[in-house]
Amino acid sequence: MRPNRYKQYATLFRVRFLTGLQYRAAALAGIATQFAWGGLMVLLYRAFYAADPSAFPMPLQAACSYIWMQQAFLAVFMTWGMDASPIALIRDGGVSYELCRPVDLYWMWFTKECAYRLSKAALRCMPILLFAALLPAPYGLRIPGAAELGLFLVSGTLALFCIAALGLLIDVSTFYTLDATGVRSLLTNAADFLSGGLVPLAFLPAELGKFLTLLPFAGMENTPLMLFNGQLAGRAAAEALLLQLFWTAVLIGGGRLWMKKALRKVVAQGG
Amino acid sequence: MDSLKLYFHYLSLHLRERMEYKKSLLLGLFGQFIVSFSLFLSIYFLFRRFHAVAGFTFSQVLLSFSVVMMAFSLSEIFFRGFDLFPQMLGNGEFDRVLVRPRSPVLLVVCSKFQLDRLSRVLQGAVTLIYALPRCGVDWTPEKAAVLGLMLLCGTVVFCCLFVCGAAAAFFTIEGIEFINIFTDGAREFGAYPMAVYGKAVLTFTTFVIPIACFQYWPVVWLTGGTDDLLYALCPLFSLLFIFPALLLWKWGVRKYQSTGS
């Protein structure tokens, strides 16, 4: 009898998640960094707001909410912070052991990538959220309504899947290049800008911003954060969610096909 | 002198090693370019919307951006060895460094050069050339000298920050992420003159971590905000940061216990 597939992945997820929870000192340092980073970002946007409030594309508090949520869930949203272990496995030949396991390689790495990011976020988000919620009005976190929170949770989950799928694409590219550092830094840094990691997409010129929201990258960060701060609602919210769903499916489907192709000609390195 | 010769020998070794993998080096150069370019783009787009921030125009901000970007990348190219230092402590490599008849600082520095940061220096230089005639400064030899001073002192300050990060590893063994807010954070946020972030941040970055000393204060003098020569000589003041950094390093070396593996 075949083992229950979902239970398998749930176990994989749990193990990776619990391993991630062990790095508490690192998380503490990360929280301190993210406080400082978020604080400086808020100060920067405050200065821009003071320079010309009429040019601000959203209320100041919505921008601050965007920044604090971004910092709280940085481990989920940062495109460049991917789990490095699959790449190492491909480089040192460990992937041949992985192939012996009675699990689909794609979903195994996908599950691990999600668990890796979620465990890091779980350790870090609470203090930042709490602190940001206590900050005085325009500079802190805007407490969302139940609907916005629900939309954020759905969209955030899709963003996690989409980012994990992007990570898997980079992993698979290692089968061909063996040295992923170049491709990885290129793709993840470009994605960081395109997903609204540096500047919320609403701050970009209108046509460019509109174009970027159609790309798969917007769904990795901009969409869930704009749903959370209430700037994306009604019909636009539904469209953004559908687009996210579409791109996630495309990235996962493409990644699976590409991996299948790569595995047909895989040569194990090293001994 | 002898040490300097050794330093350049290591540098050329490293250069030749990287040239063996040309494609990887090229991709690395391009990847680093994207990092600094996307920061540039975000500033550009924000200024298309707002035109000025805290009294600074786009070109004046670019002055600060390019100096910080170049100073940071230069110190990364030539002194990044300190950044890998926690690994050196972890795997016991530092024991081997200590038994060699050379200064440990020199050997740590020589352990790593990040040549792919060259593309960021280039980007900084191009941005600077764009900003020079547009930032409203009448360039005179003295003003050019102050600009050079900003770049030089900035590089030194970033090196000192790397030394501080390495020295902290003596006490924690692990690399500490928190130092990133002063290194990577200074690169990102230092793109704007520090006064943008308000008085508290400006005071902190003047007297504790002297980043404003080589961007905000001299930029105010350059753009004619003041005639006080003290502002122009602020970069020299930031050199005092060498002393706490060296002290911390010395203290760490004295406290050092091998991890044994």
Image (spheres, coloured by chain):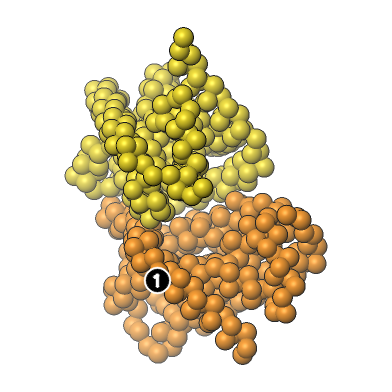
Chain colours: A yellow, B orange
User: Element at badge 1?
Assistant: helix
Relative image position of residue B29 (x, y in whole percent):
37, 64
In the image, residue B217 sits, relative to residue A37, either above or below, namely: below
Chain where mark 1 sits? B
Q: Which residue is mark 1?
A: B19
Position of residue B127 in the picture relative to residue A15 (left or right): left
| Numbered-mark total | 1
Q: Is residue B54 above or below residue B135?
A: above
Residue A105 visible in the displayed image? yes
Regarding residue A74, the answer to whether it shows in the image is: no
Q: Residues within 10 Å of mark 1 (few under 14, many from 20)?
A: few
Residue B46 in picture, x, y percent from top left = 32, 53
Compare residues A23 and B180 and report the one nearer the observer: A23
Q: Amino acid at mark 1?
A: Met
* Residue at image coords 41%, 84%: B144
Left or right: where B135 falls relative to A47: left
